[in-house]
Amino acid sequence: MAIIENQTGTKKSIDGVELTPKTTTQLAPPKFATVEQERQHRKEKLAGAMRIFGRLGFGEGVAGHITVRDPEFTDHFWVNPFAKSFRYMRVSDLILVNHDGDVVYGSQPVNRAAFCIHAAIHQARPDVISAAHAHSPFGKSWSSLGRKLDPITQDSCYFYEDHTVITEQGGAVVFEVAAGQEIAAKFPKGKAAIHQNHGLFTVSDTVDAAAFWFITMERTCQAQLMAEAAGTPKLISHEVASYTRDLTAFPAAGWLQFQPLWEEICRTDPDLFD
């Protein structure tokens, strides 16, 4: 570092770079010039999110799925094919499904339960671009209690008064369209739902945010299970929980929180783009 005296006063520099306020890069979801670019981006994020889910141990046999609405054909969604590992998902593996359950792009079958529930959510909620679900260990454990999460940590405030518990079809394998619609009807707003005896669902306007909300909700379930096993947690007040949620839990914040995970998976798993 150098400190130089001149007519205007003292200036500081490092390696010849003057230490003055800079205009920094704005961190926000990208914009696209064409629908083709946006589709490719959504598919890349979808494949990457699934690999992250696999790395975090969210895989459970053939269960679990993340969907993203197609930017052009908005009554269709991209999803992982049936019986394909989260850990090895590639962009080229993804299939496109319409709201009748037909695979219209790709040759692999779709998980019937993924179609029935996710199609119903996408149909009922135009605001939802992406939805995530997996049989993660702490989420399904917490779901058996039939309770909402409490504001016991700063991170749990993401979900304060912004998630619901769905008891309909609790524990059932959902293979009928009507059953999926019954579940979706109990999830008219909010970023997350706890489906009793089943697990967690999270939604947002990007794959990034839907995936991050799922990851942090799983860890929030773990934290509350551990805290209650040790004693009686002290709750964060309504005022503080609401303030923290409003400051940190809007969709673009969820997108931002996902970016370190995205950087990691891009560096370690470049074949996801195949």
Image: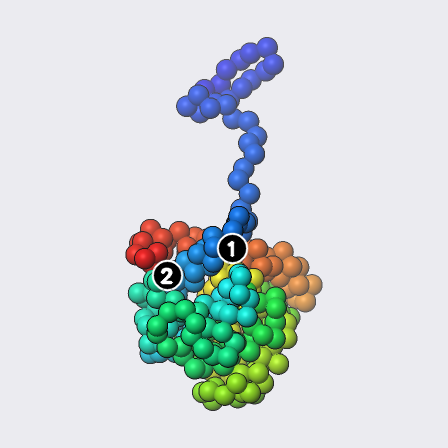
The answer to which quarter of the image holds residue 6 is top right
Q: Residue at x 35, y 74 (%)?
A: 108
Toward the viewer: 230 or 161? 161
Toward the viewer: 67 or 233? 67
Count all numbered tags in the image, as a single digit.
2
Residue picked out by circle 1:
35
The answer to whether residue 96 of the structure is visible from this angle is yes
Query: For the residue marked with disc 2, what is the amino acid?
Result: Val
Compared to 174, does 211 lie above or below?
Answer: above
Residue that sits furthest to the front in the current view:
104
Q: Residue at x 33, y 51 (%)?
A: 267
Toward the viewer: 215 or 129? 129
x and y, in percent, of residue 34 in the image: 51, 51
x and y, in percent, of residue 173 in the image: 45, 87
Q: Residue at x 56, y 62 (%)?
A: 205
Nearest to N terminus: mark 1 or mark 2: 1
Q: CA distance from mark 1 to mark 2?
A: 17 Å
Compared to 148, does 19 lie above or below?
Answer: above
